[in-house]
Amino acid sequence: MSNEQLTINNNSTIPEGSYIGGGLMRKKIVAGNWKMNKSFFEAEELISDIAEELETIDLNDTEVVVCPPFVYLEMATDIASDSNIRVGAQNVNDHDSGAFTGEISAPMLKSLEVDYSIIGHSERRKYFSEDYAFLRRKVDAVLNHDIQPIFCCGEILPEREAGKHFEIVRNQLEESLFHLPAEKFLRVVIAYEPVWAIGTGVNATPGQAQEMHAFIRRMVAEKYNFNVAEETSILYGGSCNAKNARELFACPDVDGGLIGGASLKSDEFIQIVKSL
Ligand code: PGA
């Protein structure tokens, strides 16, 4: 690690190496993104099984989050209220209420005691054309109702191959998150999800994940300050499973995972939780 000094925007300086992988105060999180899967009864069984198995584990400070489809959120928060599980939504609208047929708002989620919402998942960016400005408004909407965004960022394969992955992630964060004042930014969880790793079985190597997570933390330090960067949880997502979770989570700047396919089976999800 170099001894170079990093100047941050409050005019103080910190030694560059000291904030990379400090891991002092931030929360460790494993979140399951169920996407558009499971019937009601299957979903009920899955969350019940997870709740039961979590009772036998010493979680320390690890937070376990499940993000089922909207229609199962009430059932999920009911079961979660007697357990260590926190519940997140997979999406949210940027308005609080109104004529937006088929949409779900942050106050609605809050009324069901939902704690998190995924925002900016690459599937929503791609299939639903969600752009930077829309995502910025969604981030504001959830924070106004005390729901924590799990904000996803990450490059597609041609962008990585062209060496543009840092630039892409930088833009995603600058355009949709960095308008926030520090006290609000502290409520944000970031998930780095290289799109080429999502659902492909090809995860980022621990080296690739650590490199990007350290880059993100450094950006946060430059934008806000050292403490904010140290307190920001940065999750890895993309083909994370029971086999590779331990080595990914061992990276000093990887604070947990956003898990898709491997969160659909309670045994595997619990193995991943135990890896953190
Ligand atoms: P995956 O999905 O674990 O199935 O790759 C991760 C995600 O999309 O959040």
Image (cartoon, rainbow, N blue to C red):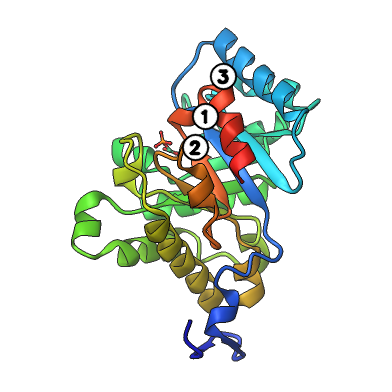
Q: Between residue 18 and residue 168, name the one nearer to us.
A: 18
Quick check: is the Cβ at mark 2 less than 8 Å away from ligand 1? yes
The disc at residue 223 is: none
Disc 1: residue Cβ within 8 A of ligand 1's nearest atom: yes
Q: What residue is at 46 percent from the left and 25 percent from the top?
A: 101
Q: Secondary structure at mark 1?
A: helix
Place of residue 257 in the rendered image (x, y in percent of width and height, measured from the top left): 53, 45
Q: How many marks?
A: 3
Question: Which residue is tagged 1?
Answer: 263
Picture quadrant of ligand 1: top left
Q: Would residue 90 be found to the left or right of residue 83 on screen?
A: left
Query: What is the three-letter code of the residue carrying label 3?
Result: Val
Query: Pointer 2: residues within 10 angstroms few (<14), some, or many (20+)?
Result: many
Q: Amino acid at mark 1?
A: Ser
Q: Earlier in the sequence, mark 1 or mark 3?
A: 3
**159 over 198 or under it: above or below:** below
Q: Identify which residue is drawn at 70% across, 28% down.
A: 112
* Circle 2 SS class: strand
Residue 134 visible somewhere in the drawing: yes
* Left or right position of 255 against 203: right
Distance between the Cα atoms at labels 2 and 3?
A: 20 Å
The residue drawn where x is 41% and y is 48% is 193
Q: Residue furthest top?
A: 41
Q: Closer to the camera, 183 or 107?
A: 183
> Which numbered dot is residue 259?
2
Q: Nearer the viewer, mark 2 or mark 3?
A: 2
- Residue 259 is situated, as x and y percent measured from the top left of the image, at 49, 37
- Residue that badge 3 annotates: 71
Mark 1–mark 2 CB contact (< 8 Å): yes
Residue farthest to the right, as pictured: 82
